[in-house]
């Protein structure tokens, strides 16, 4: 189903904890993205990476961090600085990182803060 | 990126009728306009896309129209079926990552 996977599917976090969401793709795509989805808010861009060892902030980067050490992997860390982290997180990938190519989405991780 | 305005936010149609969802944008750099369908609890999936050098594109019951001068594009679904019920997102892209609309929840009533 598109060759992009996310884990875990469900994640529970206590307040004050950092958690890391995994995203892996075997599509040989250069670009990878993280979105947050809240009801009625659509998809909001957190971070994106167009190439290994480089990434840029999206519209709602505060309280999140990423790394891109390998082409296949783009993990997202939700830090304790993110005040309202409960949401559905979607990872995506595409060919060259400008917006002119189809983005393939992973199945998502639903994060709940207890 | 600059926003994409999507309307309506909810849409109910009778099975067999047509559904139309519209999106507007304001920048001049965008040249790629995809539409995604997201079923409940699942990932968004591309259903159709259009580039700025084309005014209309069709794929069976689905069509997209683009008016680049007026900066709006629309999704048209004909002969709607219950399995068309989902949330639909428009998006725009070009030299920056895709920017998504807030979505339209389409309900097809049998």
Image: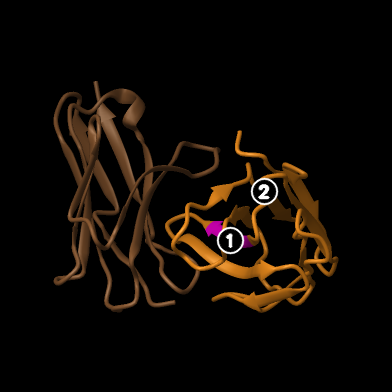
Q: Are marks 2 and 1 in contact (CB under 8 Å)?
A: no
The x and y percentages for residue B6 are 29, 60
Instruction: Please state the extent of the stretch shown in magenta in the rendering.
Output: A32-37
Q: Quadrant of residue B90?
A: bottom left
Crowd rating for badge 2 (residues with CA inside 10 Å; few <14, some 14–19, many 20+): many
Q: Which chain is orange?
A: A
Measured as percent of width and height from the top left, residue B34 is found at: 37, 53
In this view, the mark in front (2 or 1): 1
Height in image: A22 above or below B24? above
C-alpha separation, residue under disc 2 versus residue under disc 1? 12 Å
- Chain ID of residue with mark 2: A
The residue shown at (18%, 26%) is B79
Q: Secondary structure at mark 1?
A: strand
Residue at point 56%, 48% (across, down): A104
Q: In the picture shown, does residue B9 fall above or below A33? A: above
Residue identified by numbered label 2: A110
Residue receiving disc 1: A35
Q: Is residue B38 magenta?
A: no
User: How busy is the neighbourhood of tag 1: few (under 14 within 10 Å), some, or many (20 plus)?
Assistant: many
Q: Who comes first in sequence, dot 2 or dot 1? A: 1
Chain painted brown: B
Q: Secondary structure at mark 2?
A: strand
């Amino acid at each position: 189903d598109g060759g992009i996977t996310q884990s875990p599917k469900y994640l529970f976090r206590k307040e004050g904890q950092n958690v890391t969401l995994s995203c892996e793709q075997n599509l040989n795509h250069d670009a990878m993205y993280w979105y947050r989805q809240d009801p009625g808010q659509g998809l909001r861009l957190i971070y994106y990476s167009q190439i290994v060892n480089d990434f840029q902030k999206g519209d709602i980067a505060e309280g999140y961090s990423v790394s891109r050490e390998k082409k296949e992997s783009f993990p997202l860390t939700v830090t304790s600085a993110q005040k309202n982290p409960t949401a559905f997180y979607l990872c995506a990938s595409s060919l060259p990182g400008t917006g002119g190519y189809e983005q393939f989405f992973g199945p998502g991780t639903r994060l709940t803060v207890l | 990126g600059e926003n994409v305005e999507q309307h309506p936010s909810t849409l109910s149609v009778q099975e067999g009728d047509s559904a139309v969802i519209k999106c507007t944008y304001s920048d001049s750099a965008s040249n790629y306009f995809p539409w995604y369908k997201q079923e409940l609890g699942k990932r968004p999936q591309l259903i159709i896309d259009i580039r700025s050098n084309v005014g209309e594109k069709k794929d069976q019951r689905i069509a997209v129209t683009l008016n680049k001068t007026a900066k709006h594009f629309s999704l048209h679904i004909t002969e709607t079926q219950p399995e068309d019920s989902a949330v639909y997102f428009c998006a725009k892209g070009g030299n920056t990552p895709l920017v998504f609309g807030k979505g339209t929840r389409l309900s097809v009533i049998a």
